[in-house]
Image: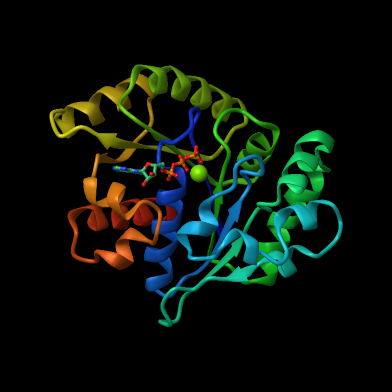
Amino acid sequence: MATIVSIHSFRGGTGKSNTTANVAAVLAARGRRVGVIDTDIQSPGIHVLFGLPGDEITSSLNDYLWGDCEIGQAAHDVTPQENGGRIFLIPSSTKPGEISRALREGYDAQRLTRGLRRLVDDLELDVLLIDTHPGLHEETLLSLVISNTLLIVMRPDQQDYEGTGITVRVAQGLEVPRMMLLVNKTPESLDAEAVKAKVEAAYGCDVVTVMPHSDDLMTLASAGIFVLRYPEHPLTALYETVADSVSSG
Ligand SMILES: Nc1ncnc2c1ncn2[C@@H]1O[C@H](COP(=O)(O)OP(=O)(O)OP(=O)(O)O)[C@@H](O)[C@H]1O
Ligand SMILES: [Mg+2]
């Protein structure tokens, strides 16, 4: 059975999309079939990391949600390396008119859920990664309901601590089977083990890793997938740990 993982954060810019793309690349390099769906309809972006320009998106999640195509037709093969595994990306539209239409009119929530299940079957996915919009939007709550695993990405920041607490409570209410945290952008001056212990005690769930703030990742600036660009980098080993943890469920 496929593992469905939502990657979420209460506040924006925590590193969800970079985490999602790097985890996808690690899993595909190990021969897994991975789906990545961008449910951040409001401000889509993960396609950039996979080298797919927004204006080359032919069919998107929006088209599917409006009944204009099947979900599989919105899947773009963005496999970066031919090594057995595959990555299929279902991007959100970057056309301003389509973004505002989605926000104005909303969409049939059940259709999204059905589409996600269909995707897993039709593309024979081992893992489906759902990159979300920050905060507690309807599409996020929906994706949580059908996920086996929720990965919450947070920074060691007081606003993120509070927001993460809210997200954890909501996910508990929705009975998400597995929840884990990734603390990202940690300044080098903080002791990673102490941060891990503090966060685990605060929320009662496992911290998969405490990632440092990385100038190398910042410099790459979403122009590619870090683990492929820097296979020997210490941060790559941390992304591999995250991939192991989320895909083991
Ligand atoms: N560990 C890190 N060290 C330094 N920069 C990072 C790190 N992780 C992510 N970033 C940078 O932070 C920015 C935001 O990352 P990303 O787009 O992955 O976050 P996001 O949570 O998906 O944002 P949004 O909420 O807007 O969708 C990017 O410029 C990315 O390169
Ligand atoms: Mg994002």
- Splitting the image into 4 quarters, where does residue 6 fall? top right
Q: Say which residue appears at 80% left-offset and 38% top-offset.
A: 106
Say which of 187 and 203 sits in front.
187
Count the marks.
0
- Residue 187 as seen in the image, left or right of residue 79: left
- Splitting the image into 4 quarters, where does residue 37 fall? bottom right
- Residue 11 as seen in the image, left or right of residue 118: left
Query: Where residue 188 appears, x then y in whole percent?
Result: 15, 34
Q: Say which residue appears at 72% left-offset and 44% top-offset.
A: 99
In the displayed structure, 30 sits above or below 167; it is below
Say which of 1 and 116 sits in front.
116
Query: Where residue 148 appears, x then y in whole percent?
Result: 55, 47
Query: Where residue 124 appears, x then y in whole percent?
Result: 62, 71
In the displayed structure, 77 sits above or below 139; it is below
Q: Say which residue appears at 23% left-offset and 27% top-offset.
A: 195
Say which of 83 and 58 sits in front.
58
In the displayed structure, 65 sits above or below 35; it is above
Say which of 167 and 216 sits in front.
216
Q: Quadrant of ligand 1?
A: top left
Query: Where residue 162 appears, x then y in whole percent?
Result: 43, 17
- Residue 85 as seen in the image, left or right of residue 158: right
Which image quarter is the N terminus in? bottom right
How was this image coloured? Answer: rainbow
Q: Say which residue appears at 18% left-offset and 55% top-offset.
A: 234
- Splitting the image into 4 quarters, where does residue 101 fall? top right
In the displayed structure, 97 sits above or below 172; it is below
